[in-house]
Amino acid sequence: MAAKVEPFWKRKTLAELDHDEWESLCDGCGLCCLQKLEDEDDGSVYYTRIACKLLDLETCRCRDYPNRRQFVPDCIQLTPGIQLTPGQASEFRWLPPTCAYRLVAEGLDLPPWHPLVCGDPQAVHKAGISQAGRMLSENAVSEDDWEDYMIFRAG
């Protein structure tokens, strides 16, 4: 009788993932590409409905993923081999609570709508996790007005 093999995200730490495994953890929600505001008093991070200029507002995918840092120098790039652990959670609280990188680092399982679990890359949109069709480009809204577009607090 064959032994049941746990999926890679349950067997490995983030540091142990290969490039393909790492990239497949991204569910395509695009939430990490939304502009965030930080409360100076308590450090809370608030997501806005304002998307990076490179984010496709319908598909929630970067329009120039390989070269994004050339056009958006402050784009935070999570890379394979990163040591994201529960002890470092405060450094990564800008990640949405549904983010697979955050969940794996915290030893939690992926949600049922994650493409690796259900096999449907559109499930993240069908489940209402992404902001597909509900975002505005950062080029369309003055930075002074971003506070008017806050949608949730992370961390």
Image (spheres, helix red, strand yellow):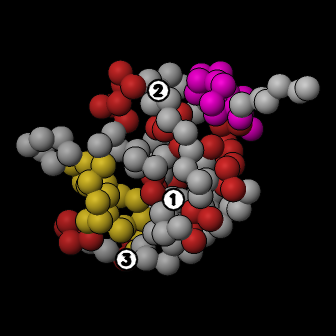
Q: Nearer the viewer, mark 1 or mark 3?
A: 1
Q: Amino acid at mark 2?
A: Leu
Which image quarter holds the N terminus?
top right
Q: Which mark is residue 88?
A: none
Which image quarter holds the C terminus?
top left
Q: Earlier in the sequence, mark 1 or mark 3?
A: 1
Q: Amino acid at mark 3?
A: Ala
The residue that appears at 36% across and 67% down in the rendered structure is: 50
Q: Position of residue 69 (x, y in %)?
A: 53, 46
Question: Is residue 54 in view?
Answer: no
Q: Position of residue 103 (x, y in %)?
A: 49, 38
What is the magenta segment's predominant secondary structure?
helix
As drawn, the residue found furthest toward the left would be 41
Work out how far the residue at label 3 is from the one at label 2, CA to CA, in angstroms.
34 Å
Q: Position of residue 5 (x, y in %)?
A: 77, 29
Would you name the residue on which mark 2 appears?
A: 84
Q: Earlier in the sequence, mark 1 or mark 2?
A: 1
Would you name the residue on which mark 3 appears?
A: 140
As drawn, the residue found furthest toward the right would be 1
- Left or right: residue 155 versus residue 99 is left
Q: Amino acid at mark 1?
A: Gly
Q: Which residues make up the magenta segment?
A: 7-20
Task: Give the secondary structure at mark 3.
Answer: helix
The residue that appears at 21% across and 72% down in the rendered structure is: 148
